[in-house]
Amino acid sequence: MPIRNEETLLSYPTDFPIKVMGRKEKRFAATVLGIVRKHAPDFDATTMELRPSRQGTYLSVTCTIRAHSREQLDALYRDLCDHPSVVMVL
């Protein structure tokens, strides 16, 4: 049965896309994957979407995870935002 939290419009569990942007570095996607899997161990890496910026300076990585709580999402966002390679998380 889905869990409805009054502080959010989401019902859990839910599929939730997270877009992470950073400088296009050799291990950026692998770094994002490691952080995502820490919070969503069942995340399938083959579903990651990678998109370089027009100039090729930045890389956007989209991961759609199965979120089970707001706390899970908050912790994931914190870890992503705290990483020095990450410029922005949406």
Image: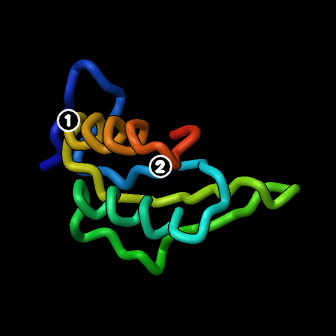
Q: What mark, if any, has residue 87 been given in the picture? A: none
Q: Residues within 10 Å of mark 2 (few under 14, many from 20)?
A: some
Residue found at x 43% / y 59%? 32
| 19 with respect to 77 (left or right) | right
- The answer to whether 48 is drawn above or below residue 78 in the figure is below
- The answer to whether 90 is drawn above or below residue 41 in the figure is above
Q: Tell me where residue 5 appears, x and y as whole percent.
A: 20, 27
Q: What mark, if any, has residue 18 been given in the picture? A: 2
Element carrying mark 2: strand
The three-letter amino acid code for the residue at tag 1 is: Glu
Farthest residue, direction top: 7
Q: Residues within 10 Å of mark 1 (few under 14, many from 20)?
A: few
Q: What mark, if any, has residue 71 been given in the picture? A: 1
| 2 with respect to 63 (left or right) | left
Quarter residue 10 falls in: top left
Residue found at x 81% / y 61%? 56
The three-letter amino acid code for the residue at tag 2 is: Ile
Farthest residue, direction left: 1
Residues 74 and 70: in front is: 74
- The answer to whether 66 is drawn above or below residue 21 in the figure is below
Farthest residue, direction bottom: 46
Element carrying mark 1: helix
| 60 with respect to 36 (left or right) | right
Residues 59 and 18: in front is: 59
Residue found at x 43% / y 37%? 81
Q: Tell me where residue 16 appears, x and y as whole percent.
A: 40, 50
Residue found at x 33% / y 64%? 34
Residues 57 and 63: in front is: 57
